[in-house]
Structure formats: structure tokens, C-alpha cells
Image: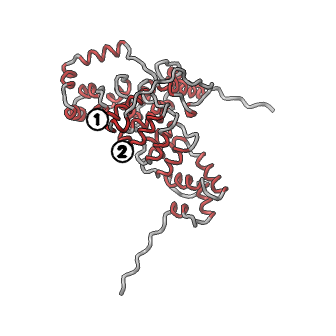
């Protein structure tokens, strides 16, 4: 008796929807979000169908995409399993907000092509996120060159790109002189939303340490432990960052090397109190604050979210994502805080006003 022929696998529902030969009713149902597809499959189907040759299907898919809640869409764009086509669609779509673009830029599934496209963006928060993705820049120097040519690149990010060129990418690939910030920032329109583009000058905010902070830093530098750590090799510092005690981590988190400072955040001994204290520091590299701000578990803490939003060293894209977490009292205070970037201050004020605006009474007929 001969062996039975192998049973062919049944195509998934997504594969059936995306099949060019799929029946129109099936594609139309998918475009309306009426099929039992998971979130990832549904969004991919909607993205593909939004450019369908059938105008009704394309229109329905576009409407379904527009109806996706912002929080749901943000989590999908941050998920590494998300199809690159979805990331590319939202990365190139006009009107995608900086918080969504930040999720795309930090997603390891994002293609080099979409990062190269976004490296020409006028949105400083997006550029800061790309500069922070050192592994991707090292892998594809064209992205770094595109950032170099972008006049909207903030001064601090430009400085970081110079350092990366010196130590990772090679002088021939990315060496350049820091650009001079524009003397006159672009005029701001009343009521302008940050998603519509913030001028480069907004991200350039140099805030010195307070006298108390400066005194604390100087006192720390005079301690025997600090002097011992300064004399360590890079390898010894990395080991101390991973296996040391809280006092050693408090010094190493301030290390000028982003590698060493970031390694502190990988220590299995870290406490929630340490993370909160790091989020408040204005003497750390902004990469430390970016890592904290994109860590889901750490940012569940209100104290951490509040500290990141208040810290002028926090990358703008991270600060913006923290604002909706804050209570009205803290939003109101941020709206008048001159020590934080203007885009954060305006956004905090706007959210506060929307929350506290009295409901409009219906007009009498």
C-alpha cells in the first residue's frame, strides 16, 4: 500500500486576503475590519488594501486605518514582529506624529530605506531617535551622511554624530564640522502642534546645573570611590557597571562613554529607586534617558515618567510620550517651566487646557 500524499497546508486568512485572486467580498470585508484577524495581520492587510486598485476597497481600508486608536497603533509600530511594510507606510505617510515616528525609528524591523528617508525629516525628535540608533548607523553609513546633510539636526545630536564618526564610523565616512545653529529661529504659529514640525532651535536648549546639583557633582568627584573608578580600564568599568553596588553605578551612570553608562542600565541589580534617580539627573548622557524612556517596565512608574518629562536633557521624542501620563497639576507646572524645551512646554500647556476646558453647553433651538 502506497503512502498517502501529504496534505497541503491551508493558507492563512491573511494570505487569502492578500492574494491578488481573492474574491472581492473577502477583500472588502478585510478593508472594513470585519474579519477575525489579529492586530498585526489586520494592520498589514489594511495597509496593503489602502492602495488597492478598487477605489471602494482602498477607501474603506484607509478609513479603518484612520480609526485605529493612537495607543494601539503606537504599540503595533513598536512591536519588532510588525511587518516592515507597515513601518514603511507610516514612516512615509504625511501627518504621522513624532511619537509614532519614534516607535518606527527604534523598531529593529524598520528597513534601512525608511530610516534613510526619515533622516531628512525636519522633526528634531525623530532625528534625535535616529542618532541614538548607533548600531544601525554603524551598519549603514548612508543614514549618517543623510543626517549630516540635514540642517534641522539639533546641535547636541550633531555633536554625538561627530563622536560616532570618530570612534565607530571612521573619519572618511562622516567627518564634518558642527553646523552653526540659525540665529533667528523660525516663527511659531499660534496653536501649532508639535507634530507639524518644530524648528531646529527648539531642541537646542542648554541648561546649566543648579548650584546644588553642581555642588553634589563636585562632592561626588572628590570621593575615593570616584577616583578609583576614574582609573579603571573600559573593561573594568563595564564589569563594575554590571556587577557593582549602587554607589558604583551612581558614578558609572555619569560616565562620558555612552557604552559604559548604558551598561549600567543592564545590571540585574538595578532597583526602581535607582532608575528614578537616574531619570532626574541632568549630568547624564541623553542616551541614558532615552533608554529609560523607552523601557516599558520602568516608565510604568509615575515618578519616572514625571522625572523624564521635567528633565531638559531627555530627548524630545521621549518627553512627548510622557506627557499624557501626567496629572493636571504637573502638566500645569510644565507649561510654565522655562528650563524645558519650548515644544514640551507648549504641548504640556495644550494637554492641560484640553483636559480642563469646561464642556460646551448645547445650543438652544
Find residue 355 and report its horizontal and vertical position in percent. Answer: 58, 28
Q: Label 1 crowding class (10 Å Cα cut-off): few <14, some 14-19, many 20+?
A: many
Q: Would you identify the image quadrant in which residue 287 lies?
A: top left
Label drawn at residue 139:
2
Front-most of residues 176 and 129 = 176
Q: Nearer the viewer, mark 1 or mark 2?
A: 2
Find residue 228 and report its horizontal and vertical position in percent. Answer: 18, 23
Left/right of residue 62 with respect to residue 273 in the rendered view: right
Question: Number of numbered discs present?
Answer: 2
Find residue 253 and report its horizontal and vertical position in percent. Answer: 30, 28
Q: Is residue 32 visible?
A: yes
Q: Mark 1 points at which residue?
A: 263
Find residue 94 and report its horizontal and vertical position in percent. Answer: 58, 41
Left/right of residue 108 with respect to residue 52 in the rendered view: left
Which element carries disc 1, helix, strand or loop? helix
Name above or below for residue 138 compared with residue 214.
below
Q: Which residue, as the protein is rendered here, is positioned at the far top?
A: 211
User: What residue is drawn where x is 46% and y is 24%?
Assistant: 180
Amino acid at each position: 500500500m502506497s503512502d498517502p500524499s501529504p496534505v497541503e497546508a491551508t493558507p492563512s486568512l491573511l494570505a487569502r486576503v492578500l492574494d491578488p485572486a481573492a474574491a472581492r467580498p473577502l477583500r472588502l470585508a478585510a478593508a472594513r475590519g470585519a474579519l477575525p484577524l489579529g492586530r498585526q495581520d489586520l494592520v498589514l492587510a489594511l495597509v496593503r488594501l489602502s492602495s488597492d486598485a478598487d477605489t471602494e476597497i482602498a477607501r474603506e481600508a484607509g478609513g479603518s486605518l484612520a480609526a485605529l486608536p493612537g495607543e494601539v497603533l503606537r504599540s503595533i509600530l513598536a512591536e519588532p514582529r510588525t511587518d516592515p511594510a507597515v513601518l514603511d507606510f507610516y514612516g512615509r505617510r504625511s501627518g504621522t506624529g513624532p511619537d509614532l515616528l519614534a516607535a518606527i525609528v527604534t523598531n529593529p524591523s524598520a528597513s534601512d530605506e525608511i530610516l534613510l528617508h526619515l533622516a531628512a525629516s525636519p522633526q528634531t525628535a525623530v532625528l534625535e531617535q535616529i542618532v541614538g540608533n548607533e548600531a544601525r548607523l554603524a551598519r549603514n553609513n548612508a543614514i549618517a551622511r543623510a543626517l549630516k546633510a540635514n540642517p534641522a539636526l539639533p546641535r547636541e545630536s550633531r555633536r554625538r554624530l561627530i563622536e560616532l564618526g570618530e570612534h565607530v564610523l571612521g573619519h572618511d565616512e562622516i567627518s564634518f564640522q558642527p553646523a552653526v545653529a540659525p540665529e533667528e529661529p523660525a516663527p511659531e504659529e499660534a496653536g501649532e502642534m508639535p507634530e507639524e514640525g518644530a524648528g531646529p532651535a527648539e531642541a537646542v536648549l542648554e541648561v546649566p546645573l543648579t548650584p546644588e546639583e553642581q555642588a553634589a557633582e563636585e562632592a561626588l568627584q572628590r570621593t575615593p570611590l570616584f577616583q578609583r573608578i576614574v582609573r579603571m580600564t573600559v573593561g573594568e568599568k563595564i564589569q563594575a557597571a554590571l556587577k557593582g553596588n549602587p554607589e558604583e553605578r551612581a558614578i558609572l551612570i555619569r560616565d562620558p562613554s555612552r557604552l559604559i553608562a548604558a551598561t549600567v542600565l543592564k545590571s540585574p541589580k538595578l532597583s526602581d529607586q535607582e532608575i528614578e534617580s537616574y531619570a532626574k539627573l541632568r549630568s547624564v548622557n541623553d542616551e541614558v534617558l532615552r533608554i529609560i524612556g523607552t523601557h516599558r517596565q520602568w516608565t510604568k512608574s509615575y515618578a519616572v515618567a514625571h522625572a523624564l518629562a521635567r528633565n531638559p536633557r531627555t530627548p524630545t521624542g521621549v518627553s512627548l510620550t510622557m506627557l499624557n501620563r501626567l496629572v493636571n497639576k504637573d502638566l500645569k507646572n510644565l507649561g510654565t517651566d522655562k528650563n524645558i524645551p519650548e515644544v514640551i512646554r507648549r504641548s504640556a500647556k495644550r494637554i492641560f487646557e484640553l483636559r480642563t476646558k469646561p464642556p460646551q453647553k448645547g445650543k438652544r433651538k
